[in-house]
Amino acid sequence: MIPNPILIFTDGASKGNPGSGGWGAIVASDDSVQEFGGREDHTTNNRMELSAAINALSKIPNSKFQILLYSDSSYVVNGITKWVHGWKKNGWQTATKKPVENQDLWEQLSGLAEGRSIEWKRIAGHADTPANTRADEIASAFADGESPQLFSGSQSEYKIDLSIIGVQSGGRRQSPYAYVSLVDGKIETHQTWGECERRVKGKTARYKKVFSKEEEDRVIADFKK
């Protein structure tokens, strides 16, 4: 039996460029979810984006797993899928014969990716992906010098929606029907992710994207348990 792909969500943040920075990552397998994060005192946003991907992949020692890695950084996704091959051939120089910035991290990321089945997915930042929002919260907290509580446990206990989009037959994208949130024991339904995000951000909350009235009813019943 082939296991489901491991899902990874990564993000990086810096307060100034350079400045204090943080990275956040979520690694989800069939039966578990783990959040990770870290901080550097003097860094850049791009270095934190790379660090998030490096640290997440380093938590998966078995190279046989299929991995879907979601990042809102075009720098990371384009770099690892396109640019890095030319950089290596050119002795870690760009097409204009300049040294590649962040070579140390690109070498680490390239080494971790080698021999693995990884799909690198570029997603829109601060948009319609709750897990990306959570990775951003972790990264921003570390950049601010805070120590956020990081989840480690089963997927059934994880309060954040790990889905990316709903897909109908034929591969067409299905728009979400609504978003359901639970904050301080009160359940609300929202028509947009922006409304839901404003309610749950920075709070102990549960929230989930739903694609039908029936699914909304099931989620509300689950939140009431």
Image (cartoon, helix red, strand yellow):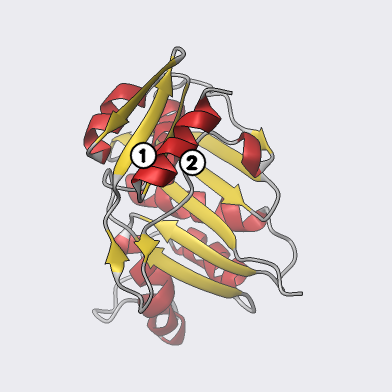
Residue plotted at (27% across, 26% down)? 198
Residue plotted at (68% across, 53% down)? 59
Q: Of the residues shown, which amino acid type is indicated by label 2?
A: Gly
Q: Which mark sits nearer the N-terminus, 2 or 1?
A: 1
The mark found on residue 206 in the picture is: none
Determine whether, in the image, residue 154 is placed left or right of residue 196: right
Q: Of the residues shown, which amino acid type is indicated by label 1?
A: Ala
Residue 127 x %, y %: 26, 46
- The N terminus appears in which quarter of the rendering? bottom right
Residue 23 x %, y %: 46, 41
Residue plotted at (54% across, 71% down)? 110
Residue 19 seen: no
Structural crowding at the residue carrying mark 2, measured as other residues with C-alpha within 10 Å and reported as few (<14), some (14–19) or many (≥20): many
- Judge whether 146 appears above or below 98 on screen: above
Residue plotted at (41% across, 76% down)? 81
Q: Choose between 202 and 72: the one closer to the eye.
A: 202
Q: Choose between 112 and 173: the one closer to the eye.
A: 173
- Judge whether 80 appears above or below 131 on screen: below
- Does dot 1 land on a helix, a strand or a loop? strand
The mark found on residue 24 in the picture is: 2
Quarter of the image where one finds residue 151: top right
- The C terminus appears in which quarter of the rendering? top right
- Residue furthest to the top in view is 184
Residue 211 x %, y %: 35, 51
The mark found on residue 13 in the picture is: 1
Q: Choose between 134 and 16: the one closer to the eye.
A: 134
Q: Say which of marks 2 and 1 sits in front.
A: 2
Residue 63 seen: yes
Pointer 2 and pointer 1: residues touching (CB < 8 Å)? yes
Q: Choose between 154 and 58: the one closer to the eye.
A: 154
Quarter of the image where one finds residue 96: bottom left
- Judge whether 127 appears above or below 8 on screen: above
